[in-house]
Image (cartoon, rainbow, N blue to C red):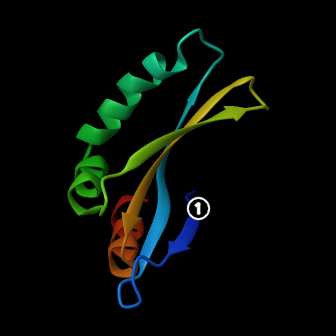
C-alpha cells in the first residue's frame, strides 16, 4: 500500500518518509477543493490522529496527475522512525 523512502536528517536519527493514505479525485475544475473533505475525514480517523501526533515533521500532502483515470492522486506523507512505522503498519494497515 505505502511506499518507503529513507531520509537521514542526522547521523544518529533515521527518519522514513511513508505514504500513509492515498485519495483519488476525478477530473475536476478545482481538485484541491474536492480532496479536502476526504483528507479531513482521514485526519479525524484513528490512524489519522495517530499519524498527526507522531509524525515529525508534520505530515504533508502531495498531488500528482493520475494518467490512468485522467484525474489526480493525493498522497499524505508522514515522517516516522522505523519503530513508529512498524507500529503503524501492524495496527492500522
Q: Is residue 80 above or below residue 41?
A: below
Q: Quadrant of the C terminus?
A: bottom left
Q: Is residue 27 above or below residue 18?
A: above
Q: Residue furthest bottom?
A: 12
Residue located at (59% from left, 8% from top): 29
Q: Residue furthest right?
A: 68
The quadrant in which residue 55 appears is bottom left
Indicate left or right for 35 with 59 as reference: right
Q: Residue furthest top?
A: 29
Q: Position of residue 78 (x, y in %)?
A: 40, 57
Q: For the residue labelled by badge 1, is the local secondary structure a helix, a strand or a loop? A: loop
Residue located at (57% from left, 56% from top): 1
Query: What crowding class fits label 1: few (fewer than 14 Cα within 10 Å), some (14-19), or many (20 or more)?
Result: few
Residue located at (39% from left, 25% from top): 36
Question: Which one is in front, 58 or 69?
Answer: 58
How many callouts does the rendering have? 1
**Residue that mark 1 sits on:** 3
Question: Which one is in front, 61 or 41?
Answer: 61
Q: Position of residue 2 (x, y in %)?
A: 55, 58
Amino acid at each position: 500500500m505505502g511506499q518507503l523512502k529513507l531520509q537521514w536528517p542526522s547521523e544518529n536519527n533515521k527518519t522514513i518518509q511513508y505514504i500513509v493514505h492515498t485519495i483519488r479525485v476525478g477530473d475536476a475544475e478545482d481538485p484541491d477543493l474536492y480532496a479536502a473533505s476526504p483528507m479531513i475525514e482521514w485526519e479525524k480517523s484513528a490512524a489519522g490522529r495517530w499519524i498527526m501526533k507522531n509524525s515529525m515533521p508534520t505530515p504533508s500532502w502531495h498531488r500528482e496527475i493520475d494518467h490512468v483515470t485522467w484525474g489526480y492522486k493525493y498522497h499524505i506523507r508522514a515522517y516516522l522512525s522505523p519503530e513508529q512505522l512498524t507500529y503503524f503498519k501492524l495496527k492500522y494497515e
